[in-house]
Structure formats: C-alpha cells, structure tokens
Image: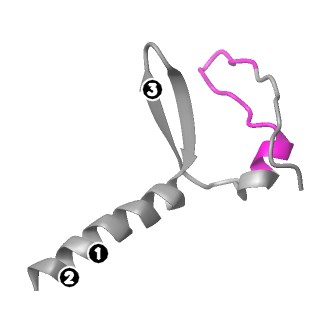
C-alpha cells in the first residue's frame, strides 16, 4: 500500500464530494462511516475518520478519569 495519494474531487450541487477509492482504502473508510471536517480559513480543510478522533478523545479522557479516581 502506498503511503501517499493525490486525487481530485468535484463538489456536487448539494455540496457533496466523493473521496477517491484509493484514499478510502488507505484509511479504511467505508460507506456509512462518519468523518470529521476541520477547517481553518488560512490553512485549509482536513478530513478525519471519526473513530481516529474518538480513539484520541478516549485516550485523553481515559487518562483524566483515572486521575480523578
């Protein structure tokens, strides 16, 4: 598997984009999965698979809950 891929997507009438298959495969994104969009006007848009964000949140909050007990 390649570590990098560049693709182009067009924005449809409803604001939808298609994530290229190579990228979906690279990150294990399947139909019905949720993604998180992060935006910064100067730096651009980032797309994260939601379970990666959930894992990070669990790691942070898990550490905090252990400290509070």
Mark 1 neighbour class, 10 Å CA radius: few under 14, some 14 to 19, many 20 or more: few
Name the element at disc 3: strand
Residue at left offset 76%, top offset 23%: 9
The label nearer to you, 2 versus 3, is: 2
How far is mark 1 from mark 3, CA to CA? 27 Å
| Stretch in magenta | 10-24
Name the element at disc 1: helix
Return the residue at label 3: 39
- Horizontal and vertical percent for residue 14? 60, 20
Classify 18 as above or below 1.
above
The label nearer to you, 1 versus 3, is: 1
Residue at left offset 55%, top offset 51%: 34
Return the residue at label 1: 62
Residue at left offset 81%, top offset 41%: 4
Determine which quarter of the picture holds residue 21: top right
Classify 13 as above or below 56.
above
The tag on residue 66 is 2
């Amino acid at each position: 598997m390649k570590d990098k891929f560049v693709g182009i997507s067009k924005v449809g009438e409803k604001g939808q984009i298609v994530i290229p298959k190579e990228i979906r495969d690279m990150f294990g994104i399947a139909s019905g999965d949720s993604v998180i969009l992060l935006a910064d006007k100067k730096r651009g848009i980032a797309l994260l698979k939601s379970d990666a964000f959930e894992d990070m949140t669990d790691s942070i909050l898990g550490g905090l809950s252990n400290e509070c007990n």
